[in-house]
Amino acid sequence: MDKRNGKNRPQRDLYSNSRPQNTRRRATYDTEEFDRYNYVDRQPYRSRSAAAQDASRYRTKKRRKKGGGLKKFFIGFMSILLVVAIGVIGYAVLMASRLDRSGDDNTEKYVQQPKAAPTWSVISDKNITNILLIGIDKNEDGSDGRSDTNMLISIDNNTKTLRLVSFLRDSYLEIPTVGKAKLNAAFAHGGAALTMQTLENNYRINIDKYISINSDNFATLIDKMGGLDINMDKAVCEAENRNMGSNLKPGVNHLNGKLALYYARIREIDDDFGRTGRQREVVELMIKKMKSMNPLEVNKIMYDYLPYVKTNLTDAELLYLASIAGPVSNYPMKTMHVPNTGTYEDKTVKGVGAVLVPDLTKNSALLREFLYGQTGDTESN
């Protein structure tokens, strides 16, 4: 008798390997025949449930191995992309290295508050990139003269819009270290830095990046692009034919660089407003022409032309602009001129000639609204 629980249990002979005859045990072992000399991937005398657990672990292990393979493939693929990216960056750096970075871009020495300008803070926005495009006339000795073109290119990533603003060269403004003079005199006295700061001081918008191009080289760039198709009226055609020896007729004409440059600069048929309008038209046509060209051809043109371009854009800024060039090329384009219609006076100043005297408060408000969608003295973002 088993004294542990008071029940009658058969007593087992501790010195015998035999089991009592009247006891029965559930058969839970694998009864398949086992060949001890030919090992199989399952231990003998293991329960079916244990074997099932082993099989489950084996399948999981295989899945992990497959996952590991995918991971290795992904890492390899990313490595290839990294190599390609490095190549693109290297190419961008190569292109950037061909730019002329010799200009003085220190604008701090020219910061001042003009008497006629509104006492507003200078407005800026991290999602709006302003770059001043400066077209330069050459002096007879080949040195840089006055700026013939002062056009702001503004990339607005908030509203996905590209804006062009022409600042008229005859605008009579207060120029630091110079005094009151035409805007185009700023470049002759202090280069791009003085030009940018003069505009920023008077119109209270942030301008600290520029690209300057000599007018003759601008014509060369148009030639490399294959010329431009421009719709011209009778007066413009007659002026071109009279002064350039061409044979143009009213309507669409295909102009080479020299004729396209003259079209943008001609003054005898109208005023500076019409002239700056033609300049914006030429820039717009050049952008559209670039979009229609083979990218490899565009790269070749830019590689050859970049040494003639001066800028203070950093390699990182140029790489960023290159990365968004595709989307930006599809942005709608809007244009404006400063001073705006009805916001200036025509005057003749002794020793200077005919000038435009802008109402700086009105023009600053209109310019802020055009570029940033807000007017008045608003804190910078």
Image (cartoon, helix red, strand yellow):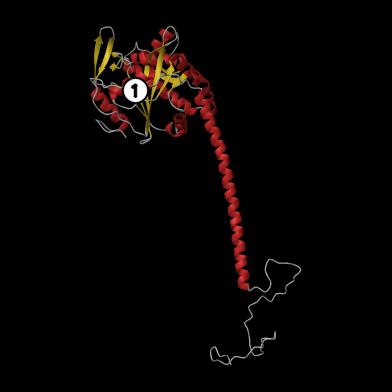
Q: Is residue 7 above or below residue 148?
A: below
Q: Is residue 343 above or below residue 376?
A: above
Does residue 210 show up? yes
Q: Which residue is mark 1?
A: 108
Residue 331 locus on image (x, y percent): 40, 33
Residue 301 locus on image (x, y percent): 52, 22
Q: Is residue 270 left or right of residue 52?
A: left
* Front residue of 224 and 112: 112
Residue 172 locus on image (x, y percent): 28, 15
* Front residue of 22 and 165: 22
Q: How many marks?
A: 1
Q: Amino acid at mark 1?
A: Glu
Instruction: Assign the N terminus to one quadrant of the image.
Output: bottom right
Residue at 59% in and 61% down: 60
Q: Is residue 185 above or below residue 283?
A: above
Residue at 56% in and 33% down: 87
Residue at 58% in and 50% down: 70
Res 9 → quadrant: bottom right
